[in-house]
Structure formats: structure tokens, C-alpha cells
Image (cartoon, rainbow, N blue to C red):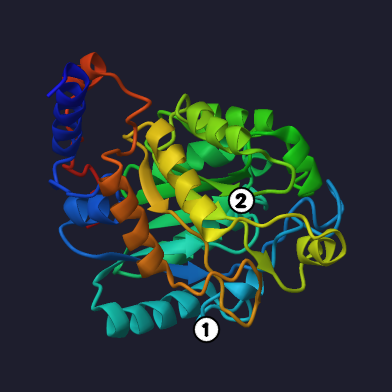
Amino acid sequence: MNTDSEDSMKLAEQYLKLFPWGTSRRYNSYTDYLLSRFGERVQKVSVDAGFTCPNRDGTKGFGGCTYCNNTSFVPPYCHPGMSIKEQVEKGVEYLTRRYNAKKFVAYFQAYSNTYAQIGDLKNLYEEALSHPDVIGLSIGTRPDCVDKEKIDYLAELARNYYITIEYGLESIHNPSLERLNRGHHFEDWAAAIELTANRGIHIASHVIMGLPNESKSQMLQTAEVLSKFPIDYLKIHHLHLVKKTILANQYLKEHFPLLMYRDYLDLVIGFLERLDPFIKIQRLVGETHPRHLLGPKWGLRVPIILKHIEEELEQKNTWQGKKFLNLSKVEKMTPIKTTSSITHL
């Protein structure tokens, strides 16, 4: 066996030992992390607090993000006409019955969930946290909808609860953000990360691969850039066109190329190889109900796609961070600590 092969095997063995749950996956699974941290399944309960976005209400534009149709992913128990308490209660009941879960995170998902005055946010968040089985919050928002006062408040909550703030990014490339009508630039995202880091708040973000006019090298560059920032979790989506969106209508006129399934698998593998292995992966593929989907139509459900990704990683003898790390750096790493400082358990 040559030296390169020996080094590769050594690196793979060390990588798999970095994570205390002893996962056999070749990427850092958020699901496995939660199971290890809390000792049991933790389920997100979506709530819709009736927020909007600054690129919808005229502050930064109208129409919202060109790919967005929130109705395509909102669960049946989640409705802004109901109180937060009612939505949480119905969601907990539904998810307990379906998954036998006992611990829950209230997921403020629809639109920009920090886009309000601090007093209003406190009322909404604390109403969700009042449920005895809710151990924390996951707050989806935009990087231009936070400030020091809001982050200070979330840092206070994080002393006793599991608090995650999820900043939409989609791309590190400003021309793509402008085409998507995001109303902010990559630099705004970087500033929000800096404001939030080291405050006890878990930081998540998400990106879309396959955006119009982005090359493969630009998409892979995204992994390298994100790895320089202190983010904890990442969602990786492919561009799937949802009916009744601006982007879907643009596609019907322009017919820009959509990712083929084989191309997406290759992209995901390359992306994971370049990504810091300590970033936990919340999602590796996007999904919407077939009745809402314009394309691409791969005819495969998420569990099958994940299985194919893991098989590809295995066949190529590669893993998350293989091209990010070198042997000397891995040898100096210490395993993730899983002892939780959260008191509300």
C-alpha cells in the first residue's frame, strides 16, 4: 500500500472517532448529534407567528425571495390564525403520536422571525417556551433582521434553553442574491454571524445549489467560504422550483438549466469534502410536495437520496472535510463535548 493510501485510511479512522456518538456516517449528522446530546429524539414543532420580510413589505422591496412559497412546506397543524400556544400544543400532540417524541424545539419557520420589535418577539418566544415539553427555539430569519438588542435577549434565553438562530443565505455570490431578490448581500450575513458568535446561541444557515448562472466551481467555493465562519449547522438544498413563485415563472420563460440527479450527487460530495467537518448537517436535499413541484422531478424521496449520498461517499472513500483538513490538524482535534449546560431539560 502506498503512503497516500495509508494516510487516507488513517485520516478516515480519525475522522470517524471525532464524534462521540461513534457514527458510521461519513458526514456530521445533526440528527445523531441531537440524539447524543439529549439522550432521545428531539422533534421540531413548526409555528407560524404571522411575520413578513423586508423584501415583501416594501422596506427593501416587494414580492419576497423569488423561490419562496411558504405554503409548500407548512405542516397542517401550523396556522397564523391560531395562537402560538395552540400551534405548539397541536404540533406536540401530532409529533408525539407520529414519532413518539418527548422533547421539542419550537421552530419559528415562516418568513423572517426576528422582524418585529423586541417586546413582541419576547411575547411570542416565551409563549412557545411555556409548554413543558419545549426545550428550546429554532428561529428562522434573515441576516438583516437582527441587532444587538435581539441577540442579547436570545443569549439570555440560551442560558436555560437550546436556542438556534437560522440565517438564510442561499449563496455567497452577491449577483445570485440580487437575482433572487434577497435584499441583502453576503456581507450582511457575515456581519450577523459575527454579531451572534460566542453568545451561547447555536448558529445555522442554509444554501441552495443549482441557482441560475452559478457554476460548479462557485457552488463548491461556497463550502470553503462557509468553513471560515463559526456556524454550527448547515442545510444544503438543491434548487427545486415551486409552483406559483416568481422563479418558477422565470423558468417557464427562460428555461435555465436545472440540476440533474447525478450532477447533484457529485455536487454534494464535492461540497461535503470542502466543508469543515465540525459543521453539523441538518439537511442534504430539498423537498416539496409533488403537487407544488415544477422541477426538477427526480422521482425519489429524501431517504433514498440520502442513502445514495452515503453510498457515494463510501465508494469514493471520502467524507465531510477530507479536502478541508490535513492529518496534522485532525490529530490535534478533540471530540465534541456533549454534556449540555441547558437547565430546562
Residue 157 located left or right of residue 160: right
The first of marks 1 and 2 along the sequence is 1
The percent position of residue 96, horizontal first and vertical second, equals 29, 80
- Locate the C terminus by quadrant: bottom left
Q: Amino acid at mark 1?
A: Pro
The percent position of residue 64, horizontal first and vertical second, equals 77, 57
Residue visible at 16% across and 20% down? 2
Q: CA distance from mark 1 to mark 2?
A: 23 Å
Q: Nearer the viewer, residue 105 or 316?
A: 316
Residue 114 got which mark?
A: 2
Residue 109 located left or right of residue 128: right
Instruction: Name the residue tied to disc 1.
Output: 76
Residue 42 located left or right of residue 80: left
Q: Nearer the viewer, residue 332 or 336?
A: 332
Q: Nearer the viewer, residue 162 or 64?
A: 64
Which of discs 1 and 2 lies nearer the camera? The answer is 1
Q: Amino acid at mark 2?
A: Thr
Residue 38 in which image quadrant:
bottom left
Number of residues whose C-alpha sits closer than 10 Å to that of mark 2, classed few (under 14), some (14–19) or many (20 or more):
many
The answer to whether residue 130 is seen in the rendering is no
Residue visible at 12% across and 24% down? 1
The percent position of residue 131, horizontal first and vertical second, equals 36, 70
